[in-house]
Image (tube, rainbow, N blue to C red):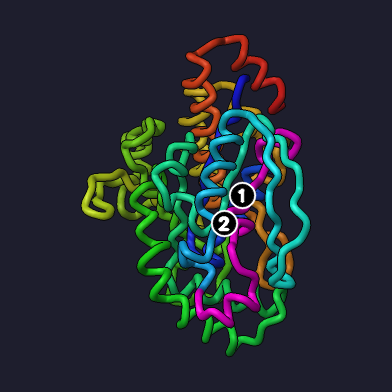
Amino acid sequence: MSRPIVLGIVGDSAAGKTTLTKGIAQVLGPENVTIICTDDYHRYDRKQRAEIGITALHPDCNYLDIMQQHLSLLQAGQPILKPVYSHKTGTFEAPIYIKPGRFVIIEGLLGYSTPGARDCYDVKVYLAPPESLRATWKVKRDTQKRGYTEEQVRQELEKREPDSQQFIRPQRQWSDIVVSFYPPTEDTDQLNGHLNVRLVLRPTIPHPDFTQVINSGNGDSASAIRLELGRDMGKPVDVLEVDGHATLEQVNEVEQIMCSNMPYLQNICNRELNPELGKVAGTTGETIQSYPLALTQLLITYHMLKATQIYQGGETRELEKLGEILR
């Protein structure tokens, strides 16, 4: 392949970007994937932001021109000297030399903020959990991993809200898939292993034919897996919902729709060969199997492999080679 396939995962702070990114990289094989965080392109460190009175979500707080330039180089298969921002210390570290792998995943706050940046992606995903759930995730992450108190995190959420509304959420319109994990009840203390997922599928890329879900009887309103027509940001979309209590048999039926269209995806669907599919840490650190997460990972992986097929013009030898790599 003369260039990598580039996936974008954009969303607000603590929306689940890193969790989803790591899961997809595990599915594709870490040796095949280069991960870039656009938060590394902050213009100011944490202390400077506090002094200036600007949040990390504001475009003026980021070198978006350099980010766009680097995305373009990565898409062309060229190396970059990437800046490094430490979320733990709030300071910058020495830049690192990055050569793109077969797949590149770009995750962060402002990845779709410029037309030039948006042109660099083959597949664009936006994460949109309910705000109450995102706040719960952010409090937990920032108190456990970044040294904040709960009060400081909630104050920061309030301070950032205007920029979230003005600069982060509008990027949803540029995505091909909107992913919203949400609790089946109002209890937002639940994590991914117990969450439902709502997948908004825009007609900007060719999705698998999930109408078979309805034809098989799995798509009625009482089912754990549902497909319906909807509207998102005023535009018509398909909406696929998977409940957290969906069984492996039900999820397998949907997965096989994707695998039947792309045989070399079957190795990824095989849970014996890919035991980490859909695994996530629970509230007490235990590992939980989430079928909604597994299906989300597979759908995004499907589109990355489909992009490979489209880019290669359907060349059988390249696709078989890729299938061997993912075995």
Q: Is residue 77 visible?
A: yes
Q: Residue at x 31, y 37 (%)?
A: 203
Residue occupied by mark 2: 17
The part of the image, by quadrant, that contains residue 167 is bottom left
Circles 1, 2 touching at the beta carbon (< 8 Å):
yes
Residue at 38% over, 75% down: 162
Kind of residue indicated by mark 2: Lys
Q: Is residue 33 magenta?
A: yes
Quadrant showing the C terminus: top right
Q: Range of the magenta residues?
A: 26-54
Q: Nearer the viewer, residue 159 or 296?
A: 159
Q: Nearer the viewer, residue 181 or 104?
A: 104
Closer to us: 239 or 41: 41
At label 1, which amino acid type do we have?
Thr
Determine whether 255 is above or below 172 in the image. above
Looking at the image, residue 227 sits to the left or right of residue 140; the answer is left
Residue at 65% from the left image edge and 78% from the top image edge: 47
Q: Name the element at disc 2.
A: helix
x then y, percent, for residue 246: 50, 52
